[in-house]
Structure formats: structure tokens, C-alpha cells
Amino acid sequence: MISQGVASADWLVRTEANLLDRHDIATSAAAGISKEAFRRLRDGRALQVALDVRDIDHAIAVAQAAASAGVQFIEIGDPLIKSVGVRAISAIKQRTPGAWIVAEMMSADWGRDQVVLATEAGADVVLLIGPASIASVSAAVEASRRLGVPIMIDVPEGRLIQGWVQDMERAGVDGFAITTNIDLGVAGFHPLDQAQLIRSWTKLPVAVSGGFEPTDVEASRRRSWDILVVGRGVTDSLDPAVAARDLAASIELTEGHRS
């Protein structure tokens, strides 16, 4: 049965069959980052550059600069996916083989389909929007387990509640993300403080974005995050490669490129 699945013309059937074959589990993990390995990022220092841009050529150039500077995660932002489609995931993955690709999927429902679409396009990690229902998150988690892809969930305003965070952890997500609303900016409860609070409620890794610059002293010295996300500080820089190198140099990285 497994051999028939591996030979299937259907990508989803083929992927699931490969994951059922114990010999191929190691191969799959080497190609991306396993759910277990992603969870081990807790208490580490990893970097993520968010490509919240609309032009694919600019996105590719920034992604390559970031990857060459040692940035571990490249996030395909919602504006880019809306402008180009999920092929943006494939295009950037092909050009940054040393980085893991995070797909920001911003729909509040169809959790399973979002994971399948993103993974089929080449995503190594899928980021779901926080207002998604438990049912949608559970469906996404089920698909992520079958496909061997980590799931992160955004913690939206109004959901910074211990019970909700722990419900999501029980549902099977692999990490949490604090994403700062670009229209609101950093106001009120600082994202680094939000991340620290979430980390007190869970043992999963926490990513945080907050309009940080590559030389942001506060972000670099705080131990309230496991993955630091920087967007415009790199994408809008005159020299993204220099900005990415400054970012990498400002913190102590504990997770290098995948082998």
C-alpha cells in the first residue's frame, strides 16, 4: 500500500506515503524542519526576516541577502502571497536552500487546506492567523502531522490569555507568534513583554515582531523570545545584505542553517 502511495501522481498521497515509510522520515526531516526540531527552538536564538512586500523580484533579492547573512527563517508575508500567489513560496525556496521558509497564511478558516497549499508550494513552516477557531486549528494540526510540517499560530489582540494559549498548545500547535499590527505600530503592551508573558504559559517557542531594527538594543538583549522577526528593517534597507548581517551580529544565534 505504501509503495503504491509513493508512486502516486497525487502530491498529497505521495507525501503522506513517504512519511509512513520510516526510511523516508529522516529524508523528510533533512529537507525541512521537523515538528520536534522546531519545538526544540525553545530557549534558542533564531532569526526570521518577513517579506511583507508585493514585488517578487525584490522579495527574492532580500531573501537571498538574508539567507547569506545567516538568517534561518524567511517568512513569505501575506502581501506577497496575495500579490503573487503561493508560487512565491516555491520561487523563494528554490533560491534560498540554506533557509527554512515560513508561509504566512492569513485565512481564519480552512485550516487543513491552508497547510496543504503552503506545504505543496514548499513551505517548511506554516503560520496561521490567531482568530482561527479550535476546529480550524485542529484540522490544520492534523494535516501538519500527516505532512510533517510545524504549525505556528499568531496571538491576536484579545487572545493574550493563558487559557487560550494552553488550549492552542493542547490542540497541537508547535509555536506561537506575536505579530505587531503594521497600522497600529508598537503601542501599549510592548510585543517583547507580550512574548515574555506567553513564554511563562507554554514550553513552545515564541516568535515576536515589533518593528525592530537590525541594531535594536532592547530586542537583542531581552530573553523574552526564541525567534526574532524583522521585516521593514531589512526589506526597506538600502542594502538588505548589510542590514541582515547587522541583525545576525546583534544577537547570539543558537540555530544555524540546516545541513
Image (tube, rainbow, N blue to C red):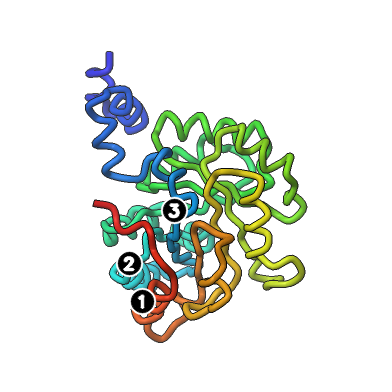
Q: Is residue 54 above or below residue 105?
A: below
Q: In the displayed structure, does residue 155 sit left or right of residue 27?
A: right
Residue located at (26% from left, 34% from top):
26
Secondary structure, mark 1, is: helix
Query: What mark, if any, has residue 146 been given in the picture?
Result: none
The amino acid at mark 1 is Arg
Q: Residue furthest bottom?
A: 238
Q: Residues within 10 Å of mark 2 (few under 14, many from 20)?
A: many
Q: Which residue is mark 1?
A: 245
Looking at marks 1 and 2 on the same chain, the residue that comes earlier in the sequence is marked by: 2
Residue 152's spot in the image, x, y percent? 53, 46
Quadrant of the image for the N terminus?
Answer: top left
Residue 53's spot in the image, x, y percent? 48, 69
Query: What mark, if any, has residue 70 been given in the picture?
Result: 2
Residue 39's spot in the image, x, y percent? 46, 43
The amino acid at mark 3 is Val
Q: Is residue 220 above or below residue 35?
A: below
Quadrant location of residue 138?
top right
Q: CA distance from mark 1 to mark 3?
A: 20 Å
Asked if the residue under mark 2 is in contact with the one under mark 1, i.e. CB atoms within 8 Å, the reply is: yes
Residue located at (34% from left, 53% from top):
90
Asked if the residue under mark 2 is in contact with the one under mark 3, i.e. CB atoms within 8 Å, the reply is: no
